[in-house]
């Protein structure tokens, strides 16, 4: 398959997911309950899970795990929230801005945004930010607050009634998480076991590719025409803290369309980037990615590690997607911000003898954008040093 065709197919998939996010409307709006206190142990809702209901969906009875490191107690910041050096009094939102960009314009630490956001009741859709809006720093009762000072002409135009959410500012750059769709996924063990699987190839084919039909078991309640991604189950992923099997690398094979339901069902492969083999799993093509949410510090202590990076690179930089070994069971939810720490080296003490482990060093910042029970996807927002697999992720330094 030509590179241009692969790019076109990926763009088509991204358009579908963007449409799904748009149709979700205010259900993904982080501002709608900005006055309500967060639970002590956040639990991701169904809108933050994968397209199909599986055992991966966060448990409603999840309890936060105790961290393995001696972290300070979590407290609300006292006094004014630290502002960015040289911050403006007003900022005009531009096309391509993200909520993180805007927060970093005003604040030293962008994850304090929810602490000082002030909803302007005079602005139509005050919870959403659009290009052309004027965001201002004001003082209320002596405390700095950020608010929408003036709405853009677009916000008030008739066209806004047609596609307002598709034009509002996202929390993170969508193109940065596109790799989540096209470069493979991480499947938790329970999810992988529950997914439909390729039973046999129709005709005299040992393997299948675009243009072939395959027989699949496990497809339920799907109508003909439903599209699926075919995923090959790759290497096992184990939790580096206790060697527990938590999932598998999922390698994208291609996609197909359900021709006939039943058990087995018939799926026609339309596009493939590698050969489809018996035992490969099928995922619904639509993936729910909430892109409108607040950056914030977790309400619980989190101590985890990076276990994988989407794309298979060894050194991780800004806007790359990572997977960590902590999820809803550990109190994480979409929008939580974590600091990354490089693991300290073990060096020899030439004076007193023996070995000494150097302290872990702050290496960057990650925002969580998709949460399952035991793992989460995060986007590297800042990388002050090179980040590696197995580096630690913890509550941001305050």
Image: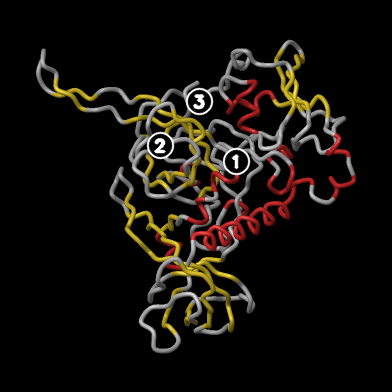
Q: Is 44 left, or right, of 356 in this rendering?
A: right
Residue, x 11% and y 16% (percent of image)?
350
- In x, y percent, where is residue 314? 34, 42
Q: Is 96 left, or right, of 309 in this rendering?
A: right
Distance from the alpha carbon under mark 3 to that under mark 1 = 29 Å
Nearer the viewer's eye, disc 3 or disc 1?
Answer: 1
Mark 2 nearby-residue class (10 Å; few <14, some 14–19, many ≥20):
few
The image quadrant that residue 296 belongs to is: top right
Q: Which residue is farthest bottom?
A: 203
Foreground: 143 or 225? 225
Secondary structure at badge 1 equals loop
Q: Which residue is mark 1?
A: 173
- In x, y percent, where is residue 195? 47, 69
Q: Which residue is mark 3?
A: 74
First reached walking from the N terminus: tag 3 or tag 1 = 3
Foreground: 211 or 312? 211
First reached walking from the N terminus: tag 2 or tag 3 = 2
C-beta proximity under 8 Å, tags 2 and 3: no
Residue, x 78% and y 26% (percent of image)?
134
Q: Which residue is mark 2?
A: 66
- In x, y percent, where is residue 52? 56, 64
Secondary structure at badge 3 equals loop
Residue 62, compared with residue 247, is above or below; it is above
């Amino acid at each position: 398959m030509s590179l241009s065709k692969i790019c076109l197919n990926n763009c088509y998939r991204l358009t579908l997911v963007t449409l799904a996010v748009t149709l979700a409307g205010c259900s993904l709006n982080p501002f709608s309950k900005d006055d309500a206190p967060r639970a002590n142990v956040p639990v991701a809702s169904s809108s933050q899970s994968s397209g199909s209901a599986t055992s991966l969906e966060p448990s409603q009875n999840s309890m936060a795990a105790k961290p393995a490191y001696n972290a300070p107690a979590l407290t609300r910041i006292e006094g004014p929230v630290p502002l960015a050096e040289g911050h403006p009094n007003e900022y005009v939102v531009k096309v391509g801005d993200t909520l993180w960009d805007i927060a970093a314009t005003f604040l030293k630490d962008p994850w304090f945004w929810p602490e000082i956001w002030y909803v302007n009741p005079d602005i139509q859709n005050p919870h959403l930010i659009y290009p052309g809006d004027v965001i201002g720093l004001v003082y209320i009762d002596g405390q700095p607050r950020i608010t929408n000072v003036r709405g853009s002409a677009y916000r008030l135009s008739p066209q806004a009634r047609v596609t307002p959410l598709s034009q509002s500012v996202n929390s993170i750059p969508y193109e940065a998480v596109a790799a989540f769709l096209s470069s493979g996924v991480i499947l938790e063990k329970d999810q992988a076991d529950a997914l439909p699987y390729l039973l046999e190839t129709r005709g005299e084919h040992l393997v299948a590719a675009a243009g072939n039909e395959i027989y699949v078991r496990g497809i339920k309640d799907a109508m003909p025409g439903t599209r699926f991604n075919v995923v090959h189950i790759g290497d096992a992923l184990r939790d580096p803290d206790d060697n527990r099997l938590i999932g598998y690398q999922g390698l994208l094979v291609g996609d197909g369309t359900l021709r006939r339901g039943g058990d087995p069902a018939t799926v026609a492969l339309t596009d493939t980037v590698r050969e489809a083999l018996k035992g490969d799993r099928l995922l619904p093509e639509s993936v729910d990615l909430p892109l409108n949410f607040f950056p914030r510090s977790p309400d619980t202590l989190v101590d985890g590690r990076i276990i994988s990076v989407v794309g298979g690179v060894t050194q991780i930089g800004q806007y790359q997607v990572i997977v960590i070994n902590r999820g809803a069971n550990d109190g994480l939810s979409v929008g939580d911000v974590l600091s990354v720490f490089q693991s300290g080296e073990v060096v020899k003490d030439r004076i007193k003898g023996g070995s000494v482990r150097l302290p872990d060093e702050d290496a960057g910042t990650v925002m969580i954008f998709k949460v399952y029970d035991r793992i989460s996807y995060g986007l590297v927002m800042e990388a002050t040093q090179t980040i590696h697999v197995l580096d630690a992720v913890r509550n941001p330094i305050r």
